[in-house]
Image (cartoon, grey):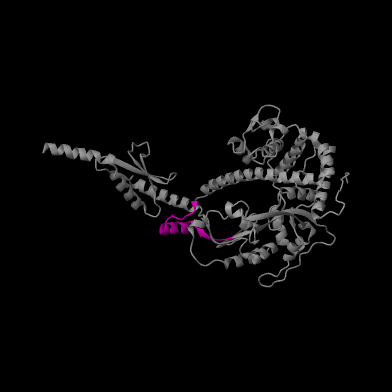
Amino acid sequence: MAGYRKKNADGPNSEDKALDLFAEMMIEKIEGIQKDWKKPWFTEGTLQWPRNLHGREYNGMNAFMLLLHCEKEGYKIPRFCTFDCVQKLNKPGKDGEELPRVSVLRGEKSFPVMLTTFTCIHKETKEKIKYDDYKKLSDDEKEQYNVYPKMQVFRVFNVAQTNLQEARPELWQKLERENSRPAIEEGEHFSFAPVDTMIRDNLWICPITPKYQNDAYYSITKNEIIVPEKEQFKSGESFYGTLFHEMTHSTGAENVLDRFKPTTFGSPEYAREELVAELGSALVAQRYGMTKHIKEDSCAYLKGWLDELKESPQFIKTTLLDVKRASSIVTQKVDKIAQELEQNVTEEQENKHSTKERIFYASVAYLQSTDDTTQLDELKDKGDYKGLLALAKEYYDGNGMDEQHTFASPLQNRGDDLLIEDKDFAVVYNGSVGGTYDIMLKYTEQEVRDHIRRYGTDRASDDVKEVAKDMAAEEFDVLKHQKLPMFEMPNGKHLFVWYNRETDTLNAGPFTGTDIPDRHRFAYNHCLSMEANLQSVNEKLEGMEEYQAEVQEESYISGLHR
């Protein structure tokens, strides 16, 4: 295999073995690209981001190698599980029901993934605490602990290496649906809205400037990315792939990941930086369903990469760790923008369908990794979502709506997955934050409105506050059609009042017939009726000096004439 030199004379440990395998696979991949540099890093339109069976994402290093592994073995679903995870699928359900056993197929070989664990020990007492608890400590408290990182190797199997399809057909079908590759927009220059928005609104860690010219590069001295305009590329994928390459470079700047200094550009060290940028951009492109070909300028580094890989497995380890850090910065930013855009679209769609009564979701139980979720986990892993819903309902204590945790959508965080719902309840799972279950009770919009009338919005979520604004706007609309509210001040001036939904205020001032009064603004109190709010505004206006001064003056003049 490609002349790779294994150096551990005493016998390799599990980490060395994993690195040896990773190096061999990378050598094979790069040699294939070297023969035909127009080949993509990953086969076009194949796989989504690798996850474990619970839905938790693998990091950049493991993700890259698992993608190569899937490609080589022909796995269509990038979901992996340990042998112990497979065995846990065979635990009896809540009612003791025995399901067909899930097992690893005979003769199948596992694949290594590398995870860093941390041991936290108090310097004086020698007490050990969990790393999650350590992260919650103050800086002063953290100083009292020694933290020891340890790289551990776990062996995983792809779900295709098990009999899951036969033993748990419902779960298998769910995995197939979740991992189907959505087709990207057809056409030479399709648009990827999150990145287009990032460029337009200058949301990246440095400016991105498309120019009509031929070069794409990241300038360290100016901390700026320059790329040709999209229309100059043969396809939209080529444009975004090139941009991801330069964005990965930009993460290496000082005060970001600090991988390089200005003087190192063009030096031998930069060959490794080019590999980081290539692998990082390939991962990012793969995450968003695009195909990434090697950048033509990077082809000159192919031999150097091969030499380093054949010489030392540590080269691939340190490189992939940098790829992990860089690609995480890119994807987190893109995902955040994508989420915001999706929320905007959702709001627009909800407004269009406002005639249909909306359903709201109130959290009644939130179970985290610190809670005992074993039974829920078992039911979820088996694909028994009806049983999971039945169990989840038992966590509801019968209390009424908590307006602080009531939302227009059950999905509130990135990674949320609506597992199942009926007419009354919904169960949301998030595998990216240690594994959480949010059990939610469903309410109609009318029920939410009734709750607002009784309890106001002092503790309400933003979604509930939006309903309260709708209620105020509707009530004022009825009122103004009868007669626009108007106050006569003590000095004889007349002020009209208008409810402004955007600012959630009652605005007062002279009304000309064309302009909405806006001289004075008073926050609307949703704990009070419209009538009570108007009365409060009237009292505040009467107390203003500008509406009292003329009264005092007139009283003084009339007194002189008596």
Task: Give how far across and how far down residue 541 sits, in percent.
Answer: 30, 44
Task: Give how far across and how far down residue 214 sits, in percent.
Answer: 71, 27
Q: Is residue 65 left or right of residue 258?
A: right
Decide whether residue 424 is among the magenta residues.
no
Residue 411 appears in view: no
Residue 460 appears in view: yes
Q: Residue at x 82, y 43 (%)?
A: 309
Query: Which residue sits furthest top?
Result: 213
Q: Residue at x 73, y 67 (%)?
A: 90
Task: Give how far across and how far down residue 109 sits, in percent.
Answer: 83, 57
Q: Is residue 107 left or right of residue 503?
A: right
Query: Which residue sits furthest bottom?
Result: 96
Judge by depth and name the residue closer to the eye, 267 or 508.
267
What quarter of the picture does the C terminus occupy? top left
Judge by depth and name the residue closer to the eye, 432 or 264.
264
Q: Quadrant of residue 88?
A: bottom right
Query: Which residue sits furthest left?
Result: 562
For the record, the magenta segment spans 438-462
Q: Is residue 124 left or right of residue 268?
A: left
How many numbered discs sit on the rendered protein?
Answer: 0
Task: Give how far across and how far down residue 535 sits, in percent.
Answer: 31, 50
Residue 236, placed above or below residue 103? above
Residue 451, placed above or below residue 186? below
